[in-house]
Image (cartoon, rainbow, N blue to C red):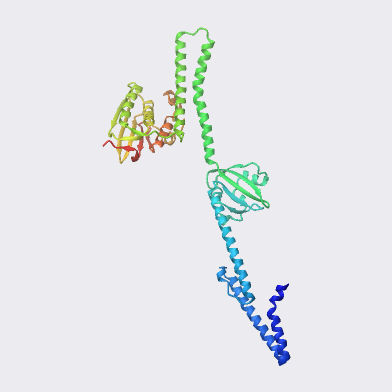
């Protein structure tokens, strides 16, 4: 209350002076003085009010831009300056926290969408924009079901039961498989979280296919062995020739299973990223000479095998792995080339790259099969592959070995004329003998 009367000090002073003037100079003089003094006060306050209005209308509300004042207005503007400084500091803290929050959300692999009580989009992060095809600038205020129209999501949103996540295949913008969950919070608001599990789905599908393929590959030899064992145990008298035939068949099928297990172990070792490459200088020419001898033995004189070595340059890598990759390609050529055909094994350096070729005059491969040849258990001709002793893992092993050596496999083939398998090694893997 004291402050209020203190603020009226000038008015009281003017009134007292006006009374004194009226007493000594007449009532009219006192009224004139009082009117002029009040007019001056009105002009004084109006001038400061106009200055305050102008300051409020500008966008840059900084303490330095506050107009100067006198009298009570000096105190008002001083308080206003302190308030603006306090607000600026609070705004800076809010902006800093907002930037930190944006950095955190940007680093998160999950998409986040904030929904209001009517399921309208209030905000989302860039990951959610990618997952759900949202453009925040254009779609803020839109209902989420306008962005995600799949029936399972609409039913999930309407059910109100969000204790379990929803797996949704998002086909509108990207071929994604999303794990989505709604989390209620605040005043009937919701947080929609989306996570890309496409790679996990792909890995799970590969696992299922792998188990099915291994089971299929083992079923035939196990059936053969089981059948012969059942026959041998049931028959009391079996002639010697039949026994030999049964033992030979069981031995072949057991060897087939052993080869399959060995290839699976090799593939598992190559796929293990913790298994580092044991690098050394590998003499490619010596490996190819060894492979020619083995190829001639495997062929049994049924094919003509040529070896061409145009470079003595070596490769930085694993001798064991490279020999396995080259050997797989050579043995495949022998298996799939009819009797009387030719097989060419060649090594050269061309355009700064190490080039290993295996060319054959076999049956050739249809173009639609070539992109899938390095898949595990993929076969162009299942029956022929099993007859020739293949496990269906050879080219998958080759692919992983080449990946570990930063090399590429190129396949060219023409049905009825033959195939060419070419391995290209990068220049950084070459070791010149010159």
Quarter of the image that includes the N terminus: bottom right
Q: Can residue 378 be seen in this view?
A: no
Extreme top residue here?
237
- Lateral position of residue 9 relative to residue 223, left or right: right
Quarter of the image that includes the C terminus: top left
Placement of 238 over or under 216, stated as above or below: above
Q: Locate residue 252: give its quadrant.
A: top left
Query: Percent from the top left, x then y, of residue 181?
Result: 62, 45
Q: Nearer the viewer, residue 87 or 311?
A: 87
Based on the displayed image, in which of its 4 quarters is residue 422 positioned?
Answer: top left
In the foreground, 70 or 36: 70
Q: Can residue 96 be seen in this view?
A: yes
Would you identify the image quadrant in which residue 352 lies? Answer: top left
The residue sitting at 56% across, 60% down in the picture is: 92
Q: Where's residue 416, x and y in %?
A: 37, 31
Query: As drawn, is 426 to the left or to the right of 383?
Result: left
Residue furthest to the left in view is: 434
Q: Is 55 located above or below residue 33 in the figure?
A: above
Question: Residue 425 placed where, x, y %?
Answer: 35, 37
**Marker count (numbered):** 0
**Nearest the eye: 284 or 81:** 81
Q: Where is residue 296 in the image (x, y as percent from the top left)?
A: 33, 23
């Amino acid at each position: 209350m004291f402050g209020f009367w203190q603020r009226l000090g000038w008015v009281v002073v003017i009134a007292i002076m006006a009374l004194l003037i009226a007493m000594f100079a007449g009532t009219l003089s006192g009224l004139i003085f009082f009117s002029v003094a009040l007019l001056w006060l009105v002009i004084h306050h109006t001038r400061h009010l106009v200055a305050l209005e102008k300051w409020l209308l500008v966008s840059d509300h900084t303490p330095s831009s506050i107009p100067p004042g006198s009298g009570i207005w000096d105190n008002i503007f001083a308080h206003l300056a302190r308030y603006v400084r306090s607000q600026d500091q609070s705004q800076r803290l809010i902006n800093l926290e907002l930037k930190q929050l944006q950095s955190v959300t940007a680093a998160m692999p999950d998409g986040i969408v904030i929904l209001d009580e009517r399921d309208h989009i209030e905000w989302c992060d860039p990951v959610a924009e990618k997952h759900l095809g949202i453009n925040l600038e254009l779609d803020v205020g839109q209902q989420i079901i306008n962005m995600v129209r799949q029936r399972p999501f609409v039913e999930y949103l309407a059910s109100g039961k969000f204790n379990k996540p929803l797996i949704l295949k998002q086909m509108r913008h990207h071929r994604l498989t999303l794990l989505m969950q709604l989390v209620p919070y605040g005043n009937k608001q919701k947080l929609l979280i989306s996570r890309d599990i496409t790679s996990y789905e792909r890995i799970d599908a590969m696992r299922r296919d792998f188990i099915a393929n291994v089971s299929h590959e083992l079923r035939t030899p196990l059936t053969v062995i089981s059948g012969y064992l059942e026959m041998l145990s049931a028959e009391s008298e079996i002639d010697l020739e039949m026994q030999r035939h049964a033992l030979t068949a069981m031995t072949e099928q057991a060897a087939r299973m052993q080869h399959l297990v060995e290839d699976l172990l090799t593939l598992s070792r190559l796929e293990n990223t913790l298994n580092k490459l044991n690098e050394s200088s590998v003499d490619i020419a010596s490996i190819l000479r060894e492979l020619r001898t083995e190829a001639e033995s495997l062929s049994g004189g049924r094919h003509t095998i040529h070896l061409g070595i145009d470079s003595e340059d070596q490769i930085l890598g694993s001798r064991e792995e490279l020999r396995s990759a080259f050997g797989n390609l050579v043995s495949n050529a022998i298996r799939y080339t009819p009797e009387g055909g030719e097989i060419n094994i060649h090594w050269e350096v061309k355009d700064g790259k190490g080039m290993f070729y295996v060319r054959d005059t076999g049956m050739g491969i249809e173009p639609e099969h070539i992109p899938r040849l390095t898949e595990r258990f993929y076969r162009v001709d299942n029956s022929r592959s099993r007859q020739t002793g293949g496990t269906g893992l050879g080219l998958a092993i080759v692919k992983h070995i080449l990946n570990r050596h930063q090399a590429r496999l190129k396949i060219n083939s023409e049905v009825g004329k033959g195939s060419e398998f070419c391995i290209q090694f990068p220049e950084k893997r070459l070791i010149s003998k010159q």
